Image (cartoon, rainbow, N blue to C red):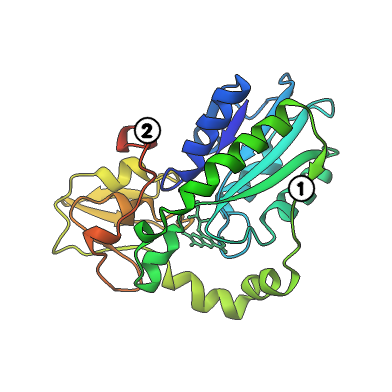
Amino acid sequence: MILYFSGTGNSLAISRQLAERLDEQVMPLNRAVTLDVSHERRVGLVFPCYWFNAPRAVTELVPRLRLSEESYVFIVIPCGAQAGNAIWTVRRMLAAKGIDVAYSHKIRVPDNSAVGFGRNPNEQVWKFDCYAGRLKRIAADIAAGVRRCHYAWWGAAGALCALPTVQRRTLPMFTPAVDTDKCVGCGLCAQVCPQGNITLADGKARCGGNCTQCLACVHFCSHQAVVINSKPTPKAHQYHHPKVTVGDMR
Ligand SMILES: Cc1cc2nc3c(=O)[nH]c(=O)nc-3n(C[C@H](O)[C@H](O)[C@H](O)COP(=O)(O)O)c2cc1C
């Protein structure tokens, strides 16, 4: 069983590719029917890295997971560059439940946060070239039951990002807001939001207070009506994994 969390589809696409090679099922972590996977022989967790750490949506759900000590547990992080403390954080949380992570790895994929810095994530699609080979090796390791955790403890960068003063500056930078002049109230953003954080009121989308900053709403909006940092998002800068559709994210 592979449990994933995904905003723009990288983690979903990688979960599917791993599942195909490993003959496993995939299930969205945030919409899972049950978090009791204690009967599974092998459990994978695939999720992005945000600000050198694991997304809040993931760290909130991990304590509720029911896993068996006998299961082979692995973590794969599709990230723009560095997984930071993401693997370390979840590994530590599972260790507190008596679960040992057998294998972990990161994979470099287009960085969907580039849009927040005025850059185009689509310019990084060259990363797909290296990811195919990496994914094949990771799947082969997992299939062979290799026990090896590849992760770095990004103490300084990870700890810096976790500082309340830094968070006060960075979090609003990446918290989406709706441009009501552009919003047509189609509700697409509400459908793709993995947190169920967007509602429609008076024909316009409205973001609630439970945003995990996955940027799904920013990248999938057909009217470029969801902005971050008060800046419009050009259509050319909107990104999602090319093999993932809106329907897959619902
Ligand atoms: C708010 C935010 C912060 C991010 N921080 C990092 C980071 O610290 N390191 C990194 O390598 N990638 C970072 N990324 C990029 C994502 O980890 C990467 O694009 C990931 O594949 C997105 O997964 P998804 O398509 O499944 O949502 C960040 C993305 C977002 C939205």
Separation (CA) of disc 2 from disc 1:
28 Å
Q: Which image quarter: residue 236?
A: bottom left
On screen, residue 206 versus residue 172, left or right, reads left
Q: Which residue is mark 2?
A: 248
Q: Amino acid at mark 2?
A: Asp
Quadrant in which the N terminus is drawn: top right
Instruction: For ligand 1, tell me if the residue under mark 2 lies within 8 Å.
Output: no
The number of numbered badges drawn on the structure is 2
Q: Is residue 119 above or below residue 196?
A: below
Dot 1, how many residues are within 10 Å of its Cα: few (below 14), some (14-19), or many (20+)?
many
On screen, residue 213 versus residue 220, left or right, reads right
For mark 1, give the secondary structure. Answer: helix
Q: Amino acid at mark 1?
A: Arg
Q: Is residue 32 at all visible to an observer of this figure? A: no
Q: Position of residue 205 (x, y in %)?
A: 25, 53
Instruction: For ligand 1, tell me if the residue under mark 1 lies within 8 Å.
Output: no
Q: Which residue is mark 1?
A: 91
On screen, residue 124 versus residue 91, left or right, reads left
For mark 2, give the secondary structure. Answer: helix
On screen, residue 249 versus residue 237, left or right, reads right
- 195 and 134: which one is in front? 134
Q: Which image quarter: residue 232?
A: bottom left
**2 and 1 marks in contact (CB < 8 Å):** no
Q: Is residue 141 above or below residue 22?
A: below
Q: Position of residue 90 (x, y in %)?
A: 71, 49
Q: Position of residue 204 (x, y in %)?
A: 19, 54
